[in-house]
Amino acid sequence: MKKLLVYLREYRRESILGPLFKLLEASFELIVPLVVAAIIDRGIGNADRGYIVRMCLVLVALGLIGLVCSVTAQYFAAKASVGFVKKLRHVLYEHIQGFSYQTLDNIGISTLITRMTSDMNQVQTGLNLTLRLLLRSPFVVFGAMIMAFTVDARAALWFVAAIPILSIVVFGIMLVSIPLYKKVQGQLDRVLGKTRENLTGVRVIRAFGKEDAEIADFESNNESLTAMQKHVGRISALMNPITYVIINLAILFLIRTGALRVEAGIITQGAVVALYNYMSQILVELIKLANLIINITKSIACGKRIQAVLDIPAGEKVNEELPSGDASFRVEFRGAGLRYAGAGGEALSGVDLRVRPGETVGVIGGTGSGKSTLVQMIPRFYEATEGQVLVNGRDVRSYAPEDLRRRIGVVPQKAMLFKGTIRENLLWGNAAAADEELLHAAALAQAEDVLAAKGGLDGKIEQNGRNLSGGQRQRLTIARALVRKPEILILDDSSSALDFATDAALRRALRSLDGNPTVFIVSQRTSSIQHADQIVVLDEGTVAGIGTHDELLKNCSVYREIYDSQFRKEGAQA
Amino acid sequence: MSKQREKAERGTVKKVLHLLRPYRVLVALSILCSAVIVALTLYVPVLIGRTIDLIIGPGQVDMPGILRLLLRIGWIVAVTATVQWVVNTINNRITYQVVRDVRDTAFRHLQVLPLRYIDAHPVGGVVSRIIADVDQFADGLLMGFTQLFTGAVTILGTLVFMISIRPSIAAVVVLLTPLSFVVARFIATHTYSYFKLQSETRGEQTAFIDEMLGGQKVVKAFGQEKECIERFDEINSRLAKCSLKAIFYSSLTNPCTRFVNNVVYAGVALSGALLCVATAGAAVPFTVGSLSALLSYANQYTKPFNEISGVVTELQNALACASRVFKLIAEPAQIPDDEDARILKTAEGTVELQDVAFSYTQDRKLIEDLNLQVHPGQRVAIVGPTGCGKTTLINLLMRFYDVDRGSISVEGTDIRHITRRSLRANYGMVLQETWLKAGTVRENLIMGKPDATDDEITAAAKAAHAHGFIKRLPQGYDTVIGEDGGSLSQGQKQLLCIARIMLCLPPMLILDEATSSIDTRTEIRIQQAFDAMMAGRTTFVVAHRLSTIREADVILVMRDGHIVEMGNHEELLKKDGFYAKLYNSQFAA
């Protein structure tokens, strides 16, 4: 939490002035009972009408000053909290931009989204309330006590007795109920999960006729949520009645003591009214304070979640001292391997591979064999945990990441497009590309019909490209990578949504690329890679063979099995 | 426009009242108790006022009288506190139970909503209606109702008490209070537009974050970090600007109404004190005690006005949320099964499609004039480019969607005259999009056959080549897998889905890219089990892999919703048409 407050520095003035004005307002409020006491004792006591009128004008004036103070305070509080959260959002977003793939995988995107949005909003509300009220409530409570002492020290002792008891009750109930509220939240998550699951699995559930079982399951989850809510509700429902009783008991004792003191001639009737008023003020403030503390607790929890993300180191270190290699190879793997953080074993190990400019490399293997891992090490999306990966003879870790990635066009497994026009999306590949270049890339990617269907380069793409089919998206992401005219083009199983005819046309087009790029094609289909210059066969994280199609058919059993599984009869005939 | 809204709101209120019906006794009790609380809380200041009147000065203190009054106050306070706790508990009970009822109803309704609705609405949207909207509704509406009610009773009660003490001073209060309303109203109307702008901008920012963080890896791959930060900052500053305005202007309400309260307070003090002086010698003097009671009323009287202005916004918000939930519940359900619908026992496997036409949207025709006759035990493969209607055909066979024209019949009966449950029980379905429920592996496997023995389960898992990896899971078959399969790989999830079907073995099968995530070697290994399963069962297979398709009895080649070619592998190759082109593209390179 402390580290976050650094970003409040810019608003130091506002964050000091806000509470200060609030205190000023509260002080004026504390004078009111004294004025009323004066009205009773001097005004009514001496039948001094002029004095009464003057004092009532003082009351209005106090109100007016209070208004000015609190409006000022609200403004400063709003300015500081909004400004702080604006800054914080920027800092967090910028920080996330520096995260490596590994970090993104570990954290998970959905939690980052809630931290950027709802957690931020809660922090803003919490800070705003804190600046406005946190000092005010204790100030009024203790102020009322001190004022009571100025009226009559003896009677004021009842305040000294009441306040600790009240604090114990308020904080005690909160301490008990906060963990219970957390449990309720947890159960609500389960109810939510159940609903989600029911919707995502609707086909399977209906196919198995499981609707009734689902309802029964949901209702039992829902019922225990209700039970938990009622349980915690019963406890927090104690807060108001108990504080009400304590305050009123204090008032009763206060009046009794007051009566004795008046009888003894030590204080006046007006003073008793003033003491009574101070006690009532405490009650009002306590209720506000309890609400405030719940809010602040939530905000602190949210703030901690934001802090946790900021604490994760971002950015990729550049190390220029790593050994270099033969610059005539576009890409070289030297005993490279990778173990994902927190994983039991290596995802990939001992890869040795040399690729010259213009060569095409096919990467094939079963699910989880490490195909994607291999190609994702080239743009340093994931860093080798053993060995080295070199591009143009230099270790990828010795490049500035932007410099390295500018040379590489990636078509990821999941076809991702963003809200905007088709042109805007394609320009990600190269911001300086002219329209002809974009159209050329689209043609190579077999995406001309997508452009035709969507209205050319100005065609609108909705969020996450949801107005396009999987195949359309995939072809546009290929075009986006081609716009870059990369030295290395990586297709990570990126034609899976294409039918065989389109896939074949795409492969033909890729062979005619200008600039002599090195192409990596990851695929499950042997047909997609069988004409590659080199084929890397992976099996459970290790290289089972490297060679051409014909070589591998001869001496790599894994490859032969994969091939046969797809071309069984032809394989046998050939 | 606003009239329409009012009407809609009234409709929602009616529905809410209907929801409260089962709890009407509790509601009545809550209202009664609230009234009691208000009356008692208001009575306390009167008694304290009287006590203070007994404390006039040295030698003029009636100590026994004071103690008597204090004791009475003590009792009243005790009763008030108890009733208060009861009311709180009752309100909690009503709120949470109504919420439970609404959620149950909504969830039940989900089970009968047509797939057409579910497919067309994002999951997140529906979930947020059932979870977040219902929560908002609970918080706002029921709390709103109680506060509104106690507020109104407090205002009325204070007025009555004030009038009973001194009508002239009560008049001062009544004359000054509208000020509070005017101020609150003025501020509310002026902040509304800022709030709207704020929530719009916030929505825009959330959408941006959602999309760009979702595609963060692509952002990095293309080095777009700086551009994204720029775009983010632009939205962020706009949001900060309108947030500041919205928060500041709305936070004016409290100080302003408090100022009005202070004026009212001063007014009561002035008129009260002057009255005290004027009636000092009179037969019925206006005492200091009465003044102190009136002053405390002046405070209590104006407070509900502030609260009510806040509650009204809460209420409107709650009604908006409630109406969204009600809208979901009111969505038309699927056509219920006929009363005399046939219960399909174990089908032999005759399926016939006659002149079937279907489209998701009216402006885009999909399937038209589809005719197909499938005999028991036949294997039907459906091939074609993406988006040609393969999956749609499955939607129709399972009756997830009803045909627009024509008919589909099983065993000679139109499936619209067969109960959905028995129809679906006759199909075993494995889809490309694997779905597992949160629960143990075992629970997932026995979905289709809840009474399966352990041996049967193991046998099915072995056949699907899932036994090996299940054994390696921490608790074997009793390992709990998270929502949507949790940490299992796509391929493992698919193997479980296959084992699930192998366990219950329905008479007909639908396999939609059932092995798409399984590597081809494992696929071959389970092929044998697959073949055994398909033997004698009518099977519909959608597949990319032509090796799977080759062995089908009938291959339907689909293109743009039409069946362009039909026949077995050899026949189709001879035809040298669309299928031949698709097939050859696998080798042409």
Image (cartoon, coloured by chain):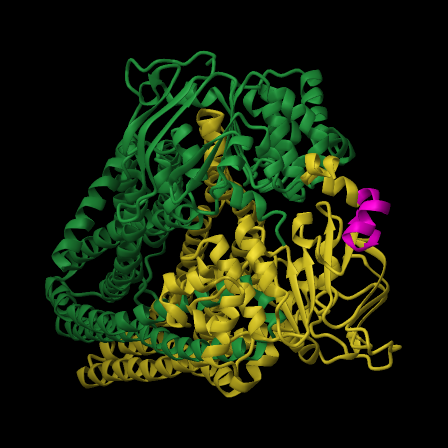
Chain colours: A yellow, B green
Q: How many marks?
A: 0
Residue A109 in the image: above or below residue B172:
above
* Image coordinates for residue B246, horizontal then vertical, percent: 34, 74
Q: Residue A135: tell me if it is visible.
A: no
Residue drawn 30% across and 44% down?
B365
Q: Residue at x 37, y 51 (%)?
A: B136
Front one among A314 and B416? B416
Going 23% across and 76% down the picture, which residue do you hit?
A: B263
Q: Is residue B362 above or below residue B371?
A: below
Q: Quadrant of residue B27?
A: top left
Foreground of the two, B330 or A288 = B330
State left or right for residue B93 relative to residue A5: left
Location of the N terminus of chain B by quadrant is bottom left
Of residue A431 and residue B220, the one placed in the foreground of this image is A431
Residue located at (59% from left, 32% from top): B550
Q: Nearer the viewer, residue B390 or B307?
A: B390
Q: Is B575 contained in the magenta span?
A: no
List x then y, in percent, for residue B459: 71, 20
The quadrant of the picture occupied by the C terminus of chain B is bottom right
> Quadrant of residue A351 in the image?
bottom right
User: What's the magenta region?
Assistant: A538-558
Depicted B441 relative to depicted B506: above or below: below
In the depicted structure, whether residue B485 falls above or below residue B372: below
Q: Measured from the top left, where is residue A92 in percent x and y?
A: 58, 72
In reply to whether residue A548 is colored magenta, the answer given is: yes
- Note whether residue A511 is visible: yes
Tell me if B121 is positioned left or right of B528 in this view. left
In percent of width and height, residue A73 lies at: 41, 81
